[in-house]
Amino acid sequence: MPEKKFQWKISQIRKQIEVVSNKCAPTVLLKNASYLNSYLRQWIKANIWIVDDRIVYVGDNLPEHSAQTEVIDCTNKVIVPGYIEPHAHPFQLYNPHTLAKYVSRTGTTTFIGDNLFFLLQYEKKKALTFLDDMAKLPYHFYWWARFDLQTEVQSEEQIFSHDFLKQWLEHKSVIQGGELTSWPKLLDGDDWILYWLRETKRRGKRIEGHFPGASENTLTKMKLFGVDSDHESMTGKDVMNRLKLGYTAALRHSSIRPDLSKLLQELQLEGLTTYDHLYYTTDGATPTFYEAGMINRCIDIALECNVPAIDAYNMATFNIAKYYQLEEQIGVIAPGRIATLNILDSIDQPDPSSVMAKGIWLLKEGKRQETGDVVEWSDYGVQSADIAWDLTTDDLQFSMPLGMKMRNAVIMEPYSVTIDSSVSELSEQHDESFLALIDRNGKWRINTVIKGFANHVQGFASSYSTTGDIIIIGKKKPEMLAAYKRMKEIGGGIVLTENGNVLFEMPLQLNGSASKEGLESVMFKQNQLNTLLKERGYGFDDPVYSLLFLSSTHLPYIRITPIGIFDVMKKTVLFPTIMR
């Protein structure tokens, strides 16, 4: 069983006992509440006493002392545990703090997040300090420990040193290993990964898979390796197959795969009789997807699909807490738990009117509460990207016969380049554009052609990518150079140029990969970017995910990576990067 990171001192526990013994007053009293008792699967009337950040009593009694108590009459209200996002990618233009600050207002107050950003773009010594400091904020942050980078890089073994992985797995905020995108290597005999899977299980922590389209045979083998859950079901049958084999299964509702309604309807047709081993995830959606909130939207969809209300809320709370062995802390309204809860106007309205996390009001009777929490990113060595090299015309030489064709926003296929790519400008009568990936430190580059990205994007530069390396796309080399130059000037980010003008720029102050701005501002910028790219021929759902996944080798079929053009299925480099 993993070490619990939230504890109370002896003096605090004694004070809590005195409150229950009616020797002193609670901090907060929620009177006449109808709350979800997850163990009984019932809505029960009760009074809830809170001392600072802990629920100390749930029952019929009222405290004898309440002169100093904040009393909230919850007659005709419903109280449920705070919602949990069990599979967050918290650096999708936003950052963990700005994401939590925004979506917590609609009830999602716990996040179990990917550590890929820390592995690829963070000082190792400061990453774990950051985890400690995030735990002090009025939200609940837990983390993964990855065993692979989801791409191909030089000297991967230096990133995944034995001591570094051990430190991550032993950290009290890290509650799972994964997500396991390199499972093909595991099947092929990679005992290094298997060793860390065993070490994860030895520490009592969960392992999450990443198995899109996996067969029953593959899923069975992954179970034997020790994997506990998977979030990649695309059909109701996929979910049922995972449940049959003893997995806990996530139902995904994300910007790239908004599948929840479809999955629930198909599960009902498949004859599902229990929701106890299911939970929701938004799987690192891009910013605008969260305009109306996060897990509250999933509950709403479940209720619309006639999922029993208790199950709809348990999939956002209790089921996740049980799975991660956290139900002694969160996901439950009961004595001894952290005071993280949502007050609703009715059972069928999952958007809360009041939100409390760790005993702190984040939203109270519909009004945002100022908590004063800040993150000083410079304390962790995270700042604007220091790009110390210039892009030149010589870097934009294109002669490769193999290009990348977009099947959709994230799937790339190989194709034979038939256009003349030696010219300085491509025609806007077709959807082929120049594409270059260049090392963020200027050491190497790889150049090809991408088909399907847009018809008339002249110059585009992005330091937002899987690895933090620089993506350059466009029809006109002078505009590509101009986009890069402006991206460098703003310290990293995303820039679109046209006819000598900067049409769009989004500074990403955190290593050129994420913004420090509030989520509302990032949403506005993302909407601008989406509109401009679609006006210029981008034909898919989410250009931000296209940028992110250009180098991601957990997806088929061909990727542009720091080691070159990579064939995912054959696991071979087709064309290597070259030194600048």
Image (cartoon, rainbow, N blue to C red):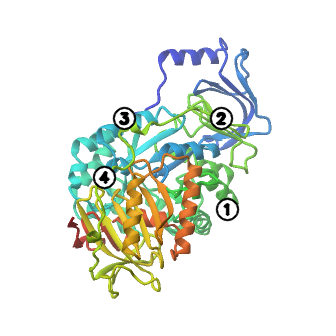
Amino acid carrying label 2: it is: Gln
Query: Where is residue 28 drawn, in percent x and y?
Result: 67, 25
Query: Where is residue 508 drawn, in percent x and y?
Result: 45, 52
Q: Nearer the viewer, mark 1 or mark 2?
A: 2
State the separation of the CA atoms marked 1 and 3.
43 Å
Residue receiving disc 1: 305
- Placement of the N terminus among the 4 image quadrants: top left
Q: Nearer the viewer, residue 483 or 473?
A: 483
Secondary structure under tag 4 reads loop
Q: Residues within 10 Å of mark 3 (few under 14, many from 20)?
A: few
State the separation of the CA atoms marked 1 and 4.
37 Å
Tag shown at residue 77: none
Disc with the residue nearer the chain's start (3 vs 4): 3
Tag shown at residue 147: 4
Residue receiving disc 3: 129
Query: Where is residue 221 drawn, in percent x and y?
Result: 33, 62
Name the side, left or right, on which 447 lies relative to 332.
left
Amino acid carrying label 4: it is: Phe
Q: Nearer the viewer, residue 137 or 456?
A: 456
State the separation of the CA atoms marked 2 and 3.
27 Å
Q: Nearer the viewer, mark 1 or mark 3?
A: 3
Query: Where is residue 246 drawn, in percent x and y?
Result: 44, 56
- Quarter of the view holding residue 441: bottom left
Amino acid carrying label 3: it is: Thr
Secondary structure under tag 2 reads loop
State the separation of the CA atoms marked 4 and 2.
39 Å
Q: Which residue appears farthest toward the top when viewing the image? A: 23
Residue receiving disc 2: 369
Disc with the residue nearer the chain's start (1 vs 4): 4
Secondary structure under tag 3 reads helix
